[in-house]
Image (cartoon, grey):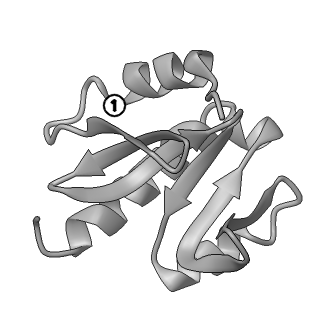
């Protein structure tokens, strides 16, 4: 599946000022951004994949433009998809920071 390169460019603009790099890696048929070796967020189709703490995941999943991220027949814990208006500023920056914070909470790989 192709991913939205316009969303990739917008993400790159937001994270360009971060002091810790987010490295890109092809994953899930899309693009993942790795922070200290852990996936933080990514692009799948025209949506944003976000890894987050359980309480943050539950909060964002209440939004109408968010849904579970599934692979095959199962869902993945602490990962959700965001689309539509959730990809506009300032929400996009907030979601990227949420993913970054989660990745930083994990041991570096």
Q: Quadrant of the C terminus?
A: bottom left
In the displayed structure, would residue 41 be above or below residue 62? above
Image point (74%, 70%), residue name: 61
Image point (46%, 28%), residue name: 11
Image point (60%, 74%), residue name: 57
Q: Position of residue 76 (x, y in %)?
A: 57, 76
Q: Report the label total.
A: 1
- Pointer 1: residues within 10 angstroms few (<14), some, or many (20+)? some
Q: Residue furthest right?
A: 64
Image point (34%, 31%), residue name: 15
Q: Position of residue 37 (x, y in %)?
A: 18, 56
Which residue, given by chain and number where applicable, does mark 1 sit on? 15
Q: Position of residue 45 (x, y in %)?
A: 68, 36
In the displayed structure, would residue 27 be above or below residue 58? above
Closest to the observer, 15 or 22: 22
Closest to the observer, 41 or 94: 41
Q: Quadrant of the N terminus?
A: top right
Query: Mark 1 falls on what kind of element?
Result: helix
**Quarter residue 63 falls in:** bottom right
Closest to the observer, 1 or 59: 1
**Quarter residue 16 falls in:** top left
104 displayed left or right of 65: left
69 displayed left or right of 105: right
In the displayed structure, would residue 104 be above or below residue 75? above
């Amino acid at each position: 599946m192709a991913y939205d390169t316009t969303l990739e460019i917008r993400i790159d603009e937001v994270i360009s000022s971060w002091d810790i790099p987010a490295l890109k890696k092809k994953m899930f048929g899309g693009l993942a951004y790795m922070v200290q070796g852990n996936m933080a967020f990514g692009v799948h189709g025209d949506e944003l994949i976000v890894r987050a703490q359980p309480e943050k995941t539950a909060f964002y999943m209440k939004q109408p433009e968010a849904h579970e991220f599934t692979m095959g027949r199962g869902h993945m814990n602490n990962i959700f998809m965001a689309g539509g208006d959730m990809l506009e500023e300032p929400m996009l920056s907030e979601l990227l920071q949420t993913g970054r914070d989660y990745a930083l909470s994990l041991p570096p790989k």
